[in-house]
């Protein structure tokens, strides 16, 4: 699935950087009804994880109260050059990954 | 078989009658303040929750509850000895009291998280931070919502 990741490509060692992620997902709440009264089953992303060179630096549990196409922004200290890996998992076996690299000097 | 005008009209009439029968739902559609308290206690346990340190940035008046930008930040040095372990956000009147749980580490550098949330009604949003010394700090904000999210019919 499509995901937009915003990570600075370069940073100074020790700098606090912002990471912004956006992924496309309907985030169906499970509380809506169709016009003929049937309940629309829940289909949401329940968990998001970000790893920096293999170490988990941020994790989130998401609920139906998160808007469609979940946007998350958080911070981390740029320690070394390497790779950020992002993973979204959810209902009906949903899983999606993305990655971004950074050069720390 | 050709449909006569009479058959068509009686069919159409029948559908209209069926369509006007109200659908009764017994399940409560929104969280109550009791549910909010239960959800908070599930995270916090018996610990005391103090007010302060946490800042909740959310517009006080929202036109569309389907996507409301929200930023939670906590005053913390974010060092190994003193950092924010997690941030939990709750609401009062959506069908479910939880919004999100966010887990940070000392290497987060800054205790701040942004996302976009859904609000089903004019209500209170509560953000609670758990620090590394296992104290809890909270802040609440009242938000007026003109167009509700979550429970509308699907088209």
Image (tube, helix red, strand yellow):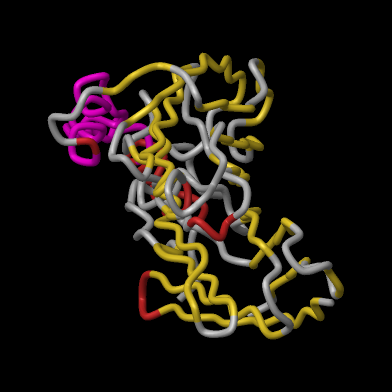
Q: Is residue B62 magenta?
A: no
Q: Is residue B21 left or right of residue A33?
A: left
Above/below status of B111 relative to B27: below
Rendering coords of residue B73 (x, y %): 58, 35
Rendering coords of residue A51 (x, y %): 54, 76
Please give the name of the residue rendered at 51% of the width and 31% of the height, measured from the top-left corner. Answer: B119
Q: Is residue B139 left or right of residue B36?
A: right
Rendering coords of residue B12 (x, y %): 45, 47
Residue nearest the observer in this picture, B17 or A80: A80
Count of numbered marks: 0
Q: Quadrant of the N terminus of chain B?
A: bottom left
Residue nearest the observer in this picture, B80 or B5: B80
* Image: magenta residue range: B19-43
Above/below status of A71 relative to B42: below
Residue nearest the observer in this picture, B149 or B109: B109
Rendering coords of residue B91 (x, y %): 40, 29
Q: Quadrant of residue B71?
A: top right
Say if residue B100 shows up in the picture. Answer: no
Q: In the displayed orientation, state which residue is furthest to the front.
A: B81
Please give the name of the residue rendered at 57% of the width and 65% of the height, measured from the top-left corner. Answer: A25
Please give the name of the residue rendered at 32% of the width and 38% of the height, measured from the top-left corner. Answer: B96
Above/below status of B142 relative to B35: above
Say if residue A1 shows up in the picture. Answer: yes
Residue nearest the observer in this picture, A23 or B3: A23
Q: In the displayed orientation, state which residue is furthest to the left.
A: B46
Q: Quadrant of residue A86?
A: bottom right
Please give the name of the residue rendered at 53% of the width and 38% of the height, measured from the top-left corner. Answer: B118
Q: Is residue B42 magenta?
A: yes
């Amino acid at each position: 699935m499509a995901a937009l990741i915003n990570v600075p490509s370069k940073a100074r060692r020790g700098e606090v950087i912002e990471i912004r992620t956006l992924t496309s997902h309907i985030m169906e709440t499970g509380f809506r009804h169709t016009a003929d009264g049937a309940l629309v089953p829940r289909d949401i992303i329940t968990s998001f994880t970000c790893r920096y060179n293999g170490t988990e630096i941020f994790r989130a549990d998401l609920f139906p109260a998160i808007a469609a196409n979940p946007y998350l922004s958080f911070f981390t200290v740029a320690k070394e050059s390497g790779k950020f890996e992002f993973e979204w998992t959810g209902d009906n076996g949903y899983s999606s990954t993305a990655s971004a690299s950074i050069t720390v000097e | 078989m050709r449909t006569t005008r009479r058959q068509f009209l009686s069919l159409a009439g029948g559908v209209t009658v069926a369509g006007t029968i109200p659908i009764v739902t017994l399940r409560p559609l929104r969280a109550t303040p009791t549910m909010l308290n239960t959800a908070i206690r599930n995270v916090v346990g018996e610990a005391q929750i103090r007010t302060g340190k946490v800042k909740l940035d959310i517009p006080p008046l929202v036109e569309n509850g389907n996507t409301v930008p929200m930023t939670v930040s906590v005053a913390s040095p974010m060092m190994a000895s003193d950092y924010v372990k997690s941030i939990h956000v709750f609401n009062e009147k959506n069908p479910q009291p939880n919004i999100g749980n966010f887990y940070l580490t000392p290497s987060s550098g800054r205790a701040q998280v942004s996302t976009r949330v859904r609000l089903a009604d004019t209500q209170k949003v509560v953000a609670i931070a758990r620090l590394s010394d296992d104290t809890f700090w909270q802040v609440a904000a009242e938000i007026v919502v003109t167009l509700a999210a979550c429970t509308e019919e699907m088209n």
